[in-house]
Amino acid sequence: GSSSCSVCPAGRSTQMRLGSSRCDDCSRGRFSEEGAPDCHACQEGSYADSPGASACQACSGDLTTRFPAAEAVEQCMCPQGTFRPSGAELRSSCEPCPKGMRCEFGSDLQNRYGVNNGTYPLVQLGYMTMQEDPLKVYACLLPDHCPGGDTASCDRHRDAAVPACGSCLAGGKTKRKK
């Protein structure tokens, strides 16, 4: 008998099994071109959401993925140091993190309102933001008045309803240094 050689179609490979004639689908997050001996991971900033992909799909706009081999469009997020603003028309754009805030990978303003269980822009130590405008950052006169973290966070004796935690709570008094 005679044997013939053939190549695997795009999206499939022999998975590096020498002499194998079996072509298997590339798994999610991986792709192959026609005749490739193995599947390759999608690069950061792209994903393959179904098995047998011949190419990866790029994340839209400013979005990227944290790691190679992403398996779903939901893994496309804003890079560290930026955040995704609210509003449907802006869902593929990322804005720089405001001074005095920190934005981890995937920061999304909608997460602040419980839309998803993900990260959102947080305030750094020595700064604070008000509930009404969570991206308007106030530098505090004394850093220990403002612990950072969530919106409207002040030291326990400071008034979170006042910008920069600038007042004592009712009944409290400011200690003056002599």
Image (cartoon, rainbow, N blue to C red):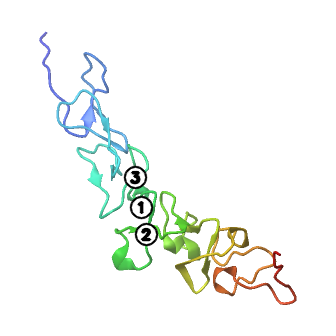
Pick the front one: 22 or 73: 73
Left or right, 71 with reference to 22: right
Residue labelled with disc 3: 65
**Which quadrant would the N terminus be assigned to in this image?**
top left
Task: Say whether marks 1 and 2 touch (CB < 8 Å).
Answer: yes
Q: Earlier in the sequence, mark 1 or mark 2?
A: 1
Q: Is residue 25 visible from the viewing direction of this image?
A: no
Judge from the rendering whether residue 56 lies leftward or rightward of residue 34; answer left or right: right
Of residue 116 and residue 39, the one placed in the foreground of this image is 116
**Drawn side of residue 98 relative to residue 139, left or right:** left
Callout 2 touching callout 3 (CB < 8 Å): no
Check disc 2: other Cα within 10 Å, few if <14, some if 14-19, many if 20+: many
For image coordinates 38% across by 43% down, the residue present is 69
Q: Position of residue 162 (x, y in %)?
A: 68, 87
Rendered location of residue 156, percent (x, y): 80, 75
User: Which label number is shown at residue 84?
Assistant: 2
Residue at left 69%, top 83%?
A: 166
Q: CA distance from mark 1 to mark 2?
A: 6 Å
Up the image or down, 14 lies above or below 171; here it is: above
Which residue lies under the disc numbered 1? 78
